Amino acid sequence: MKLNNDKVKINGNASNEADKKGLKGDKDTEFLPEYNDKKIVERAKKGDKAAFEQLVRIYSKYVYTTAFFMMRDSHDAEDISQEVFVKVYLSLKDFKGLSSFKTWIRKLTVNTCIDKLRVKAKTADKKIGLEAFEDNYEIIFPSFNHNLERNFLTKETLKEVLKVIVQMDESYRIPLILRDFQDYSYREIALLINKPIGTVKTNIHRARKIIQDKLLNNKKKINNLVKE
């Protein structure tokens, strides 16, 4: 694959060559069981192009979704997705398997986003909605942790939660995503964003409170409409 000239295909649109070699699962973008994941990674490390493309198919939506919610910009998310898979392609031979591949690509994605945010210094005060994003945005959550459901009620409220998060100030949004979506420890978050642990904990608590208050307010509005 000529990464210098041809972009790595993201968002589940990798070529069908993987299908021909029998690497395709039931759904292109589902996370595979650990043993299947390891087999594909080992093939990709040996230069198997189809295996690498299968990894792109499996993880592209997760990478894009993570980048979208951290950056709040679809173009940045696309650029970061491209950059992450280039890094994967160039570094895969050095992947030792000390952690799972999905943990490794999670760290690559988050660190790339953090680097971009540092370059920007401060993101613009954008007002965006989920309309610019795919309906399968929930790919960011299920295979990594269950903090979201524990902290924010049920999956039925997921879209409402994301609408609030995507409008949050960066100081609240980034720590919340890292903690509740990506399962980073408070210490890891503090090191990543260069903030005291106390500040990280406070901002995450405030972010959760913002979400809870917004959901409660929306529920009251719905109840009032029903009564009218």
Image (tube, rainbow, N blue to C red):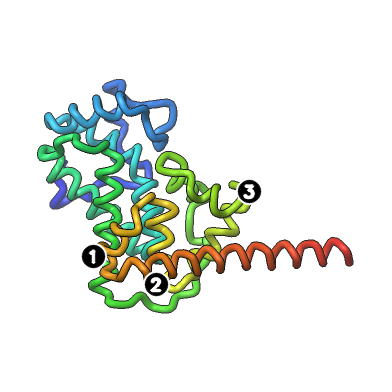
Which residue type carries mark 2? Answer: Ser
- How many neighbours does mark 2 have within 10 angstroms: few (below 14), some (14-19), or many (20 or more)? some
**Of the residues tagged 1 and 2, which is closer to the observer?**
2
Find numbered disc 1 in the image and state the secondary structure of the residue it sits on: helix
Residue on which the image places disc 2: 171
User: In the drawing, what numbered circle is on residue 156?
Assistant: 3
Considering depth in this image, is 157 or 49 the residue closer to the camera? Answer: 157
Q: In the picture, which quadrant includes the C terminus?
A: bottom right
Q: Depth check: 80 or 170 in front?
A: 170
Residue at screen point 35% across, 37% down: 58
The circle on residue 115 is: 1
Residue at image location 33% in from the left, 66% down from the top: 197
Q: Quadrant of the N terminus?
A: top left
How much space separates mark 3 and mark 2, taking CA atoms?
26 Å
SS category of the residue bearing label 3: helix
Q: Which numbered disc, 3 or 2, marks the residue that appears first in the sequence?
A: 3
Q: Amino acid at mark 3?
A: Glu
Residue extending farthest to the front is: 198
How far apart are labels 1 and 2 at the CA level?
15 Å
| 155 vs 23: above or below | below
**Residue 181 percent coordinates (x, y):** 43, 52
> Mark 3 touching mark 2, by CB under 8 A?
no
Identify the image quadrant of residue 112.
Answer: bottom left
Kind of element beneath mark 2: helix
x and y percentages locating residue 44 in the rendered image = 18, 32
Hey, which quadrant is residue 117 in on the image?
Answer: bottom left
Foreground label between 3 and 2: 2
- Between disc 1 and disc 2, whose residue precedes? 1
Asked whether the residues under the numbered discs 1 and 2 touch, taking CB atoms below 8 Å apart as contact, a structural biologist would say no
User: What amino acid type should be assigned to the residue bearing mark 1?
Assistant: Asp
